[in-house]
Image (cartoon, rainbow, N blue to C red):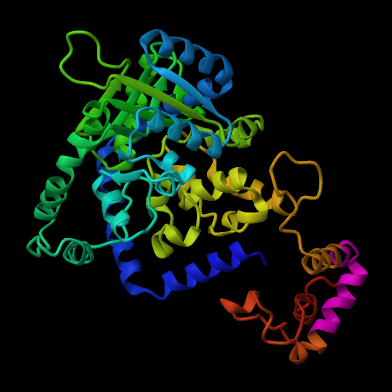
């Protein structure tokens, strides 16, 4: 068992033994599920929109190289500087180089899961550059040194009392309150000066449009717009899979993204950035930089089945409906993106030798696949990665076969051999019945969460013959 696996097991146990975490997640998940259901009153219209969104994303992935070249061409024509990063190390160095070029010692950030993937905050802070999260949820967890536990609501594992206590501890001069609106106003007051004084801002990107060279950002708080318009330098970081072909592709994706994520008809802000500030314009940055990160995405895109992983539009619906995620929370997964989509994406990105346990953290109930707005077959992908974890044949996935264990392999080989030959099977069941009381009761890890069944006193064949069935 690898250290990463041991750590994940520990986090799962801690989460299951923490009633506060379970209660926080259960209340919030139930609310998000109800809002999503209400936002799609017409089931047929919902499924039609899902198929349309899936087709748009599938088309983009099928034409990814050409669309990325077109995106670069149009962005540069618009005045946006495009940078390519094969790995997170390269992406971090690109961001660092831009900041050093402008002698920037401070970076104000909007919410970006790609920057979490890069480990950007710690990378820059180790080099003397202060990073401040401006999204309320990200700001809260940054204060206590935690990672996001959900891709839409980073501080979803905290209730308002916990947040109030964090503010009291970090900002003792601010009057204590548990009122959510007042807590939000306090955070805004703390962040306002940071927006005006930061020499550079960083954001994620929800969609990038190849046809027009446009960056699209979806948000509710306005902090993303502040990060991208007030500082003189705007850096956008995104994975290469976020590209779409046409501007007309964005409305259906935005529609289903918002309703799947929060149950809203539309978010408060939808930002479209196609260039830096132009002559005569009153706001906007002097420079816009787009960092396109690969980090294994090209390899994933090369597999016809696994490439569907990259359709994801980061709505979080699969997490909201997952019975496992709702009970253990996001931190138990020990990965940048938790939940069902994280259990599919992260092992492909980081390797099955490190995160091969994640595909097994699932009941395979199918809810994640049923609610995915872009029809990603998540249960099938989870099964595929479970197979790849023990597969010793050729595979494109890093760490394939690393989950294979000799004892388990031997056990299933014997099971297959016994069940292939009827005579051998009858001998085996006969011995199991006779020795039933000698079977050990503790067969870990199976019996950690299950009671080991004991063979019956008589086999089904014996019972059938006793009742006169199966006789000539």
Q: Quadrant of residue 357?
A: bottom right
Q: Identify whether 322 is placed above or below 129.
A: below
Magenta stretch holds residue 15: no
Secondary structure of the magenta portion, mostly? helix
Task: List x then y, in percent, for residue 409.
Answer: 80, 63
Q: Residue at x 39, y 26 (%)?
A: 207
The outermost residue toward the front is 103
Front one among 458 and 138 = 138
Camera sees residue 185: yes
Task: List x then y, in percent, for residue 69.
Answer: 53, 14
Task: List x then y, in percent, for residue 339.
Answer: 46, 52
Question: Which quadrant of the rendered structure holds the N terminus?
Answer: bottom right
In the displayed structure, does residue 333 sit left or right of residue 278? Answer: right
Magenta stretch holds residue 424: yes
Task: List x then y, in percent, for residue 87.
Answer: 57, 36
Front one among 215 and 455 = 215
For the record, the magenta segment spans: 417-432
Q: Residue at x 26, y 39 (%)?
A: 39
Q: Residue at x 51, y 21 (%)?
A: 60
Q: Identify whether 74 is placed above or below 160.
A: above
Camera sees residue 155: no
Q: Quadrant of residue 447?
A: bottom right
The outermost residue toward the bottom is 437
Question: Which quadrant of the rendered structure holds the C terminus?
Answer: bottom right
Q: How many marks?
A: 0
The outermost residue toward the left is 175
Q: Residue at x 89, y 66 (%)?
A: 422
């Amino acid at each position: 068992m690898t250290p990463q696996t041991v750590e994940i097991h520990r986090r799962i146990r801690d989460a299951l033994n923490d009633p506060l975490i379970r209660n926080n997640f259960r209340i919030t998940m139930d609310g998000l599920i109800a809002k999503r259901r209400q936002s799609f009153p017409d089931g047929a219209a919902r499924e039609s929109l899902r198929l349309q969104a899936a087709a748009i994303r599938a088309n983009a992935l099928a034409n990814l190289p050409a669309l990325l070249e077109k995106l670069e061409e149009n962005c540069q024509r618009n005045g946006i500087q495009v940078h390519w990063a094969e790995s997170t190390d390269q992406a971090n160095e690109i961001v660092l180089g831009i900041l050093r070029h402008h002698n920037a010692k401070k970076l104000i950030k909007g919410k970006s899961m790609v920057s979490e993937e890069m480990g950007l905050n710690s990378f820059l802070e180790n080099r003397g550059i202060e990073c401040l999260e401006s999204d309320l949820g990200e700001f809260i967890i940054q204060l206590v040194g935690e990672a996001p536990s959900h891709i839409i609501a980073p501080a979803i594992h905290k209730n308002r009392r916990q947040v109030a206590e964090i503010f009291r501890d970090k900002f003792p001069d601010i009057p204590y309150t548990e009122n959510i609106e007042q807590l939000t106003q306090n955070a805004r007051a703390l962040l306002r000066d940071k927006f005006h004084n930061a020499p550079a801002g960083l954001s994620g990107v929800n969609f990038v449009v190849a046809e027009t060279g446009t960056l699209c950002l979806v948000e509710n708080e306005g902090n993303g717009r502040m990060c991208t318009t007030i500082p003189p330098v705007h850096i956008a970081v995104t994975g290469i899979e976020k590209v779409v072909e046409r501007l007309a592709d964005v409305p259906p994706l935005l529609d289903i993204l918002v309703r799947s994520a929060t149950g809203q008809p539309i978010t408060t802000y939808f930002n479209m950035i196609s260039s830096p500030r132009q002559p005569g314009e009153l706001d906007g940055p002097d420079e816009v930089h787009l960092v396109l990160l690969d980090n294994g995405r090209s390899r994933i895109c090369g597999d016809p089945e696994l490439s569907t992983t990259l359709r994801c539009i980061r709505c979080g619906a699969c997490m909201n409906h997952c019975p496992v995620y709702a009970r253990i929370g996001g931190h138990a997964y020990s990965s940048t993106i938790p939940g069902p989509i994280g259990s599919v994406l992260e092992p492909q990105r980081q390797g099955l030798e490190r995160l091969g346990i994640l595909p097994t953290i699932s009941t395979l109930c199918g809810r994640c696949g049923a609610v995915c707005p872009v029809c990603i077959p998540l249960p099938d992908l989870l099964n595929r990665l479970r197979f790849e974890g023990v597969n010793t044949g050729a595979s494109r996935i890093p760490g394939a076969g690393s989950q294979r264990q000799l004892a388990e392999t031997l056990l299933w080989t014997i099971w297959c051999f016994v069940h292939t030959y009827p005579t051998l099977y009858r001998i085996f069941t006969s011995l199991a019945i006779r020795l039933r009381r000698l079977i050990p009761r503790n067969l870990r890890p199976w019996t950690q969460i299950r009671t080991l069944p004991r063979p019956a006193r008589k086999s089904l064949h014996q019972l059938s013959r006793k009742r006169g069935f199966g006789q000539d």
